[in-house]
Amino acid sequence: MARLFHVALSPFCRKVRLSLAEKKIEVELVEERYWEADADFLRRNPAGKVPVLRLDGIMMSESGPICEYIEETRPEPSLLPRDPLQRLEARRLVNWFDDKFHHEVTSKLLYERVNKKMMKMGYPDSSNVKSGAKAIKYHLDYMGWLLDHRRWLAGDVMTLADFAAAAHLSSLDYISDVDWNRNSSVKDWYAKIKSRPAFRSILADQVPGFPPPLHYNNLDF
């Protein structure tokens, strides 16, 4: 069985979990307090970050390469289009969410509200929270524009780009930081992807000290 060292609300870990689940790869989840810099964990990944996945006898890190490895070794069902231009667009959007969205939104909201408390690093920085709350509006509008022209974020089929976006938004939704009424196209897209069997374990997450809102695991929210 695969083993994933993860943090429940990490969008990068969630992206890997979604990829594994979509491809029906059974995995054991191991909660990892990576900020404590445990020696055993640092041997698994000297960078001291999650996710870390043990699969096929290999210990691998960084969500991007992990998802690419899963895709290359378990090509069905495909999470990247076969057409090179469509594959380029899917990868562009994965990078958009894991880089730009993460920097402008996730790190400003989730990390300030949750990670700081878990790591005992003090109180949230209100200026960061305000910045993240403002930036997410732009990103939701951009997603809405994409979905007005496409069935899924990167095109006509669901791809890893949708899982990357859903990983970030589901983490933020856990702390009620997503205004689903801002764009109906985005809400409909999330309801659709949230209903997939791959999402079940994510909707069952419970983080001690941070109870999810009532709508979090409601498929008809």
Image: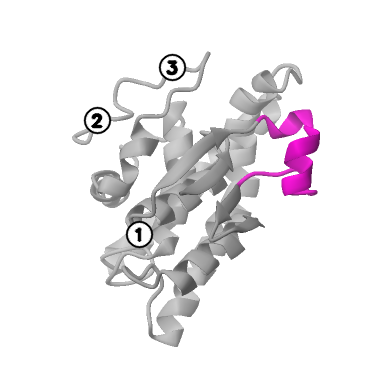
Name the residue tied to disc 2: 218
- Tally of marks: 3
Q: CA distance from mark 3 to mark 2?
A: 14 Å
Secondary structure at badge 1 equals: loop
Mark identifier at residue 211: 3
x 57%, y 39%: residue: 6
Tell me the kind of residue under disc 2.
Asn
Name the residue tied to disc 1: 23
Secondary structure at badge 3 equals: loop
Spot the residue most to the left: 220
Residue 194 at what x, y percent from top left?
A: 29, 44
Answer above or below: position of 20 versus 173.
below
Secondary structure at badge 2 equals: loop
Q: How crowded is the residue under tag 3: few (<14 C-alpha within 10 Å), some, or many (20+)? A: few
Tag 2 or tag 3, which sits nearer the N-term?
3
Name the front one of labels 2 and 1. Answer: 1
The magenta span reads: 33-51
Magenta stretch: includes residue 137:
no
x 60%, y 24%: residue: 113
Name the front one of labels 1 and 3. Answer: 1
